Amino acid sequence: MRNLTVAITQMASRHDWAKNCDAAEALVRQAAKAGAKLILLQELFDGDYFCIEQHAKFFEGADELDRHRTVKRFAALAKELGVVLPVSVFERANTAHYNTTVIVDADGRQLGFYRKTHIPDGRGYQEKFYFSPGDTGFKVWETAAGKVGLAICWDQWFPETARAMALMGAEILLYPTAIGSEPPNPTYDSSTHWQNVMRGHAAANIMPLLASNRIGKEVAPDGRHDIFYGRSFIADYQGEKVQEMDRTEEGIRVHSFDMDEVQGLRRTWGLFRDRRPEMYGALMTLDGRVKSAAVN
């Protein structure tokens, strides 16, 4: 038996780096005390969600990864507590900017980073103004908690993302997130849809999945706002929710999995054995039209 205890976190973020990091650190410590060895913080937890509107001043919050104060602080925390800790930050790389998560192992080493692949661009979520599309490709890391695959928020709506990480050997999927109200239609609540999509990823790939979201109303300088609906959750390998938070609470949820049992089911179920990659050409196109080889 290879038992793994994991934790999700959920909190409101404010326009105050120190307070946000203090709050996040408190949740990480609480989760570690509860036995968690892999702890997921939400997307861009160290600041407010500045992508509600386009304001050049917010680029000042980005920094190079090798000197990013948030990465340094939480790498030290991971080492102190002996936990695997993904750290979501606004990255500057020369003239480029990315929505990036650094994977910190339980000994404090930075194993690498992932840059968000799919960048949304809609009212209330104007991320294309700030972030270039990620160039890392999907990644899986061998950590003290096992083989971890991680993608970021909007990536979670694309089943190709989860399947790619599963094919690369991931044993568990992580999705740090910032999602809430839909400004074009304020009466629409996408939270159940959001959960169901990821629950499908867990079930289709036969592996646990963690999603950590933020909560609270955040207001841009021009007065526009998003209301983040929380509902962070942990799903098991069948896609069933085994832990869930509500729309307003700050805190953690913890759950344990027998990763050997899950691996055995994944190996014997046949989903990966019976794949036919040569038949999936449409996935390599935008319009689904597969060009046939010329006939002489």
Image: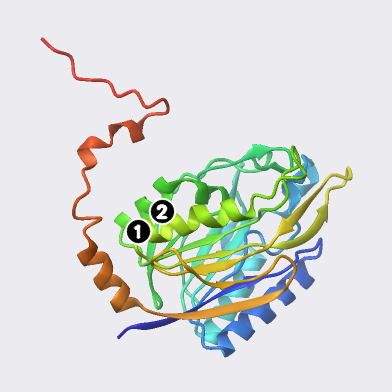
In the picture of the structure, the residue carrying the numbered disc 2 is 162
Q: Secondary structure at mark 2?
A: helix
The answer to which image quadrant residue 3 occupies is: bottom left
- Tag count: 2
Residue at horizontal 49 percent and vertical 56 percent from the top: 198
- Of the 4 image quadrants, the one containing the C terminus is top left
Which residue type does callout 2 highlight?
Answer: Ala
Q: Does the CB distance between marks 1 and 2 fall below 8 Å?
A: yes
Residue 35 is situated, as x and y percent measured from the top left of the image, at: 52, 88
Nearer-the-camera pick, 115 or 14: 14
Residue 64 is situated, as x and y percent measured from the top left of the image, at: 60, 56
Q: What numbered label is drawn on residue 205?
A: 1
224 vs 267: above or below:
above
Q: Residues within 10 Å of mark 1 (few under 14, many from 20)?
A: many
Q: Secondary structure at mark 1?
A: helix
Residue 37 is situated, as x and y percent measured from the top left of the image, at: 48, 81
Q: Hey, which residue is sitting farthest left in the picture?
A: 296
Q: Residues within 10 Å of mark 2 (few under 14, many from 20)?
A: many
Which of the two discs, 1 and 2, labels the residue nearer the N terminus?
Answer: 2
78 vs 120: above or below:
below
Residue at horizontal 88 percent and vertical 42 percent from the top: 222
The answer to which image quadrant residue 123 occupies is: top right
Question: Distance from label 1 to label 2 (Cα)?
Answer: 8 Å
Asked whether residue 151 appears in the rendered view, the answer is no
Asked whether residue 120 appears in the rendered view, the answer is yes
- Of the 4 image quadrants, the one containing the N terminus is bottom left
Which residue type does callout 1 highlight?
Answer: Asn
